Amino acid sequence: MKICILSDSHDNRPYLEAAVRAAIAAGAEVVLHCGDLVAPSTLEVIRPLNIPVHVIHGNNTGDLYMMGRVASKEANRTHYYGQDAGINLADRRIFMVHYPHYAEAMAATGDWDLVCCGHDHLANIHTVKNLAGKYTWLVNPGTVGGINAPATWVLGDLETMEFTLQYVKSDDRVEYAT
């Protein structure tokens, strides 16, 4: 199963939509958003793409009540967890949290196959030696919103556990009327 890992969209609808469209074109079946979505209505740009979205909030929480309402709508494919989430996809244990230091600690436990985070807008993909003497993947996709850094996201393959950094291309962005 291929997945789209992104974070820190900060209400940048054109970049968020462009990243998810590119991920779907590359075979992604699920989106993991590691926080700082901000306004829950930002998810409306990807709702028509009919892909499940797992989202947590970050330090720019926006309207948490409305996020809960958006996620609870009938026939919605948005799953909202709060400040962090432990989920299973394709027989892989995945932990999502916004903060890199928290992610590093969770990766070190050995309880997870993949830990995803955001917050610092610095894309980083590496493994962490864990307490079980093995390695856990730690993926920070950077900022899909392009906040003080290039607009990036990560395409992951849960079967092969390969993760590649992707850039939102200027010609992929969707422009919205303001």
Image (cartoon, helix red, strand yellow):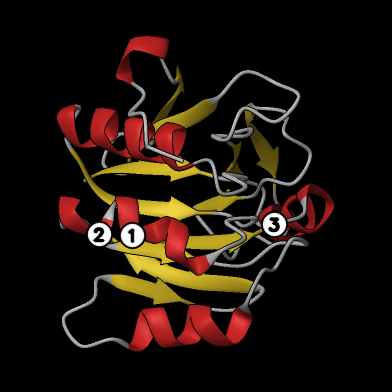
- Please tell me in which quadrant of the rendered image residue 5 appears: top left
| x 62%, y 45%: residue | 8
Q: Give me the residue at 55% from left, 62% from top.
A: 95
| Disc 2: which residue | 47
Above or below: residue 153 compared with residue 118: above
Residue drawn at (63%, 67%) of the image: 57
> Regarding mark 1 in the picture, which secondary structure is present there?
helix
Label 2, label 3: how far apart the Cα atoms are: 22 Å
Report the mark closest to the observer, 2 or 3. 2
Q: How far apart are the two marked residues, 1 and 2, measured between alpha carbons?
A: 5 Å
Residue 134, horizontal then vertical, whole percent: 60, 45
In x, y percent, where is residue 13? 44, 42
| Front tag of 1 and 3 | 1
* Residue 78, position as x, y percentages in the image: 33, 71
Which label's residue is closer to the chain start, 2 or 3?
2
What mark, if any, has residue 62 been given in the picture? none
- The answer to the question of whether label 1 and label 2 lie on touching residues, with beta carbons closer than 8 A, is yes
Q: Hey, what amino acid is under mark 2? A: Arg
Q: Is residue 12 above or below residue 125?
A: below
Q: Does residue 156 show up?
A: no
Q: Which residue is mark 3?
A: 98
Q: Residues within 10 Å of mark 2 (few under 14, many from 20)?
A: some
Against 111, is 101 above or below? above
In the picture of the structure, the residue carrying the numbered disc 1 is 44
The amino acid marked with disc number 3 is: His
Q: Which residue reaches farthest right?
A: 101
